[in-house]
Image: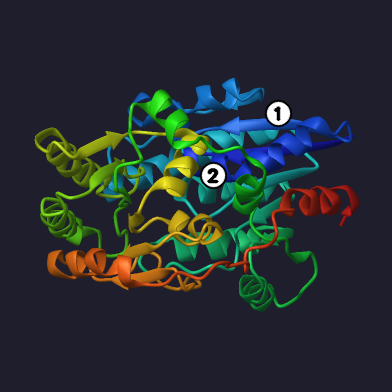
Amino acid sequence: MKRIGILTSSRADYGIYYPLLKKLQSDSFFSLSVIAFGTHLSAKFGHTVDRIKEDGFIVTHELDTMPPNDSPEGVSIAMGKTILAFSSLWVKEKFDVVLCLGDRYEIFAACASSIPYNVKLAHLHGGEETLGAIDDCLRHSITHMSTIHFTVAEPYRQRVVALKGSDKNVFNTGSLSIDNLKHLKLFTIEEFKKQFNIDLSIPTILITFHPETVSYEKNDWYVNELVGALEELTSYQLVITMPNADTMGNVIREKLNQFIGRSANAIGVESFGMLGYLSCMKHCSLMLGNTSSGYVEASFFPKYVIDLGTRQNGRIVTENIRKCDIEKTAILKAVNAYSYIQLPSKIDIYGSGESSDYIVKILKEKND
């Protein structure tokens, strides 16, 4: 039996992990331990550790590592808390492989704490670039800490090979998000309305806007421009999901909540959960914001995406994505233009939906 640890710090990475977790849990070759920390344990962010348990997984460890606030100092303190918390965990727990996903600061801190213990890390979503966020240096650092690499597209695999100076244990497995979309039964419009009391038969824009963490001092201005545009989009239902726990995230959250409170056509959602979010994506008219789901998951349908600002700069831009400055007039122009643009019928650079099988096979075979 191979002992596998899973590092999950947010609703976002858990949603991506889900099909792989199901495969690992059902295979007697593996002993699975889910380690939840970060926003999973925060009531403000929906206490999403409960959703992991509701989905039938045993959460072996719950670590309180939330920042005291969203200032640079608060984020730095959270990184320190995470290193301390995991330093104690690595003393007690021994895993054959620990899976880590993405590029968030708390994932970086958990991985960094494992280095003195010679923990074997397997990194998912390496090789990507997001030039408008601090994530690049964190993601590439995790790549250098890791022994096994599961990338979601061939250009990203090639970048990991360049970073590591070797192609050993570097695999393009495609995206687990495509597994989710291929195999999950998403809500119909009627089921979604019953579950969330939101009618997606109305023309709807799904909005997710996170802070830009490189130029974080500009986020107050950015959200004002976004809200200014949203105020004029009165012919749409606006479904707004809340930003994650990055620097200046609370400023964006507060401004969006104020807008939602005074707008008859706006609905705020802390967390749909994976099934709800993907179902909303399927049925909405278009997506607006700067979330990575606008790159991978939205390509499956494909869904028209207006990507704001520079947070995701460096990712592969597929035909369904339009880059847009975070400026009121530019946003309105992009939204008004979407109905005139012909979307491709298929985008398949992120795999065919069998990524979890590929990853499980590699984890079984790899001992070096």
Q: Position of residue 132 (x, y in %)?
A: 35, 67
Q: Quadrant of residue 29?
A: top right
Residue 13 numbered mark, or none: 2
Q: How is the image coloured?
A: rainbow
Q: Nearer the viewer, mark 2 or mark 1?
A: 2
Distance between the alpha carbons at the discs numbered 2 and 1: 25 Å
For image coordinates 36% across by 24% down, the residue present is 43
Q: Quadrant of the N terminus?
A: top right
Contact between labelled residues 1 and 2, with CB atoms less than 8 Å apart: no
Q: Position of residue 318 (x, y in %)?
A: 49, 72
Of helix, strand and loop, which one carries label 2?
Answer: helix
Instruction: Look at mark 1 in the image and give the residue it sits on.
Output: 92
For image coordinates 18% across by 56% down, the residue present is 226
**Of the residues shown, which amino acid type is indicated by label 2?**
Asp
Would you place residue 307 above or below residue 85 in this image? below
Task: Say whether residue 211 is left or right of residue 177.
Answer: left
Would you place residue 303 above or below residue 50 in this image? below
Task: Say whether residue 161 is left or right of residue 259.
Answer: right
Of helix, strand and loop, which one carries label 1?
Answer: helix
**In terms of depth relative to the viewer, which is nearer, 3 or 78?**
3
For image coordinates 88% across by 31% down, the residue present is 28
For image coordinates 77% across by 52% down, the residue present is 359
**In terms of depth relative to the viewer, which is nearer, 290 or 74?**
290
Residue 131 can be seen, yes or no: no
